[in-house]
């Protein structure tokens, strides 16, 4: 009888067919389900690439340090509501220039005092116009990022609200030797979530 099991004969499908079927199935899964970097960019996570028009004649903006969050290496500074984007850009460039000259502590408190890489070896400097959004708890929300579980911080200002209030952001990371300075109009967290008016400067 042909249906009976015979010693020495293979029962079922050839093993190579099974292996190739599994490989093709995995390839299809990765190709169709897992998002590629092209899809991420298409979703708009990189922010607009429209060039920012800067007014070189803009007067320097007056600012005040509002809050420091030492455990998160963060500082918030407040500028007048009337400050233009050009003035905020000028402020961010000035902060970078002072950092490069080693004199940023004259303007902003040290975030990593005494560190071998400098007093601002890691820093997040947030520029806002409304002092309400320059408070410690808001800065903690921004520093934690968009994907921090909201249930753990029920009284915190929502990330989406706080993010839109950021006029400018200057991130220093001396551990990133290739590009230690990052500045922007608006705000974007490390995952790519950004405010509506976000523009990368440097």
Image: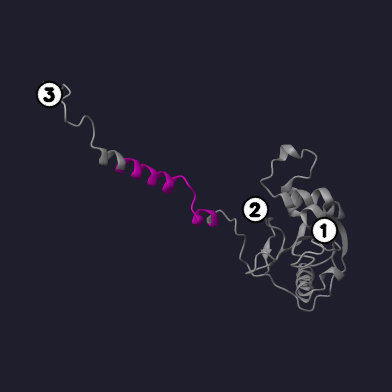
Query: Residue, x 87% and y 70% (percent of image)?
Result: 106
- Is residue 21 within the magenta segment? yes
Residue to which mark 2 is pinned: 193
Q: Which mark is residue 2?
A: 3
Which residue is more in the foreground, 91 or 171?
Answer: 171
Q: From the viewer's perspective, is 14 left or right of 133?
A: left
Q: CA distance from mark 3 to mark 2?
A: 64 Å
Residue to which mark 1 is pinned: 76
Q: From the viewer's perspective, is 112 left or right of 29?
A: right
Give the magenta-colored segment's residue range: 20-41
The answer to which of marks 3 and 1 sits earlier in the sequence is 3
Q: Is residue 94 above or below residue 76?
A: below
- Is label 3 in contact with label 2 (beta carbons under 8 Å)? no
Q: Is residue 193 above or below residue 149?
A: below
The answer to which of marks 2 and 1 sits earlier in the sequence is 1
Label 3 secondary element: loop
């Amino acid at each position: 009888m042909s249906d009976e099991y015979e010693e020495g004969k293979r029962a079922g499908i050839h093993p190579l067919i099974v292996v190739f079927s599994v490989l093709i199935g995995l390839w299809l899964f990765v190709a169709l389900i897992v998002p590629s970097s092209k899809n991420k960019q298409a979703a708009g996570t990189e922010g607009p690439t429209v060039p920012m028009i800067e007014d070189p004649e803009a007067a320097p903006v007056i600012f005040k340090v509002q809050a420091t969050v030492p455990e998160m290496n963060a500082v918030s500074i407040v500028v007048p509501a009337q400050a233009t984007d050009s003035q905020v850009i000028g402020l961010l460039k000035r902060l970078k220039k002072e950092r490069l000259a080693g004199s940023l502590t004259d303007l902003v408190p040290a975030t990593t005092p005494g560190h071998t890489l400098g007093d601002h070896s890691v820093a997040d400097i947030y520029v806002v116009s409304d002092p309400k959004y320059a408070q410690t708890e808001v800065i903690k929300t921004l520093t934690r990022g968009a994907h921090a579980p909201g249930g753990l911080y029920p009284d915190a200002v929502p990330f989406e609200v706080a993010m839109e209030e950021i006029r400018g952001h200057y991130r220093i990371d001396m551990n990133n030797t290739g590009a230690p300075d990052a500045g922007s109009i608006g705000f974007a967290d490390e995952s790519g979530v950004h405010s509506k008016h976000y523009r990368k400067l440097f």
